[in-house]
Image: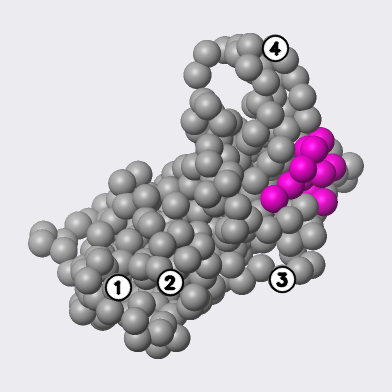
Amino acid sequence: MKRFSWRPASDIAVDLGTANTLVLVKGEGVVLDEPSVAAVETGTGRVRSIGLEAKRMLGRTPEGVEAVRPLQDGVIANFDVAEKMLRHFLRTVITRHLLRVKPRLIVSVPSGITEVERRAVRDSAKTAGVREVQMVAEPMAAAIGVGLPVDTPVGSMIIDIGGGTTEIAVIALSGIVADASIRVGGDEMDRGIVQFMRKSYNLMIGEPTAEMIKIQIGSVMPLDPELVMPVKGRDLVSGLPKTVQVHSEEIREAIQEPVQQIMNAVRHALELTPPELASDILEYGIVLTGGGALLRGFDRLVVHETGLPVQIAEDPLTCVVRGTGKILDDPDRYRDVLTT
């Protein structure tokens, strides 16, 4: 994107995720992709930094500063910090435009969100200086971003595995016919790896290290060959820094519980699916989106557990925000998927 644009950012789509926040401006595409992290001074509550700079501080902050994730399990847990973070991201985008207006905003939210959580999202956006706020369910936005025919009578099934939530939905005629929204995702897997390293190696590691292990050697199905990597942390017995060699089979065992919860939710959604739509899914298959779709072997695991054809979406990390962008481009077609 150019440093400045003459066109005002009047229509903006936001994927307010537990792990990352993505912002798309109509006519320009994705203009911002930052971690949903803020560094806050514990005494005053003043936000010191937001985004990538704050994420680098996770587990490394001095006394008096805390790196926090204002969104937990896909919804706002710290309203004050979330509002400041959203305002910072919107201001970053709007100030790149010479003509500045209060934008209209579409925010993607989990399909299982409560009315109180929905109000928190709306109030955060309004306080951040937005003219109008509309919401779309994350699996619906992901399906539109992938290019599935959500407004036709044909059934489409999508599994969106994010940082805090996993959204499973069967979609037809611009509505979610059967769904399962569970507050289990990549963060739960990271916590499983932290606990495993503690129990098996007496090694204390932080969640950023656990995430790196998951990305480098994590898998949900056997690999050929299996992978190994050195992991550094603090020995819980001696208190000294230590390095151990960790194998991919061990990490597979560490993340087994959250992966099994996701598969149980997939089966539950399929059980709720009407027979006519089930036949469509048998023909057209399931689409995987979200960061969890990149975990080695997840598509093979879903095929093994369900017997249905499965494909991973192209660029699964941006499917949700690209879907909200398509809604901005064609509001008449997708009017029925939005809520205020």
Q: Which residue matches tag 2? A: 170
Residue 46 marker: none
Question: Could you tell me residue 149's position as x and y percent?
Answer: 38, 57
Q: Which residue matches tag 1? A: 281
Answer with mark 4 or mark 3, whichever residue precedes in sequence.
4
Question: Could you tell me residue 332's position as x and y percent?
Answer: 58, 46
- Judge the density around disc 1: few (<14), some (14-19), many (≥20) Cα neighbours within 10 Å: many
Answer with mark 2 or mark 4, whichever residue precedes in sequence.
4
Q: Secondary structure at mark 3?
A: loop
Kind of residue at badge 2: Val
Kind of residue at badge 1: Ile
Query: Residue drawn at (59%, 67%), measured in percent from left and top?
Result: 111
Kind of residue at badge 3: Thr
- Residue 337 or 242: which is nearer the viewer? 337
Q: Which residue matches tag 3? A: 114
Query: Residue drawn at (41%, 62%), measured in percent from left and top?
Result: 152
Answer with mark 1 or mark 3, whichever residue precedes in sequence.
3
Verify CB contact (< 8 Å) between mark 1 and mark 2.
Answer: yes
Q: CA distance from mark 4 to mark 3?
A: 38 Å
Answer with mark 1 or mark 2, whichever residue precedes in sequence.
2
Q: Nearer the viewer, mark 2 or mark 4?
A: 2
Q: Secondary structure at mark 1?
A: helix
- Left or right of 54 on screen, residue 31: left
Q: Is residue 260 magenta?
A: no
- Residue 69 or 97: which is nearer the viewer? 97
Please identify the residue farthest to the right as the structure is shown: 44
Q: Which residue matches tag 4? A: 98
Kind of residue at badge 4: Leu
Answer with mark 4 or mark 1, whichever residue precedes in sequence.
4
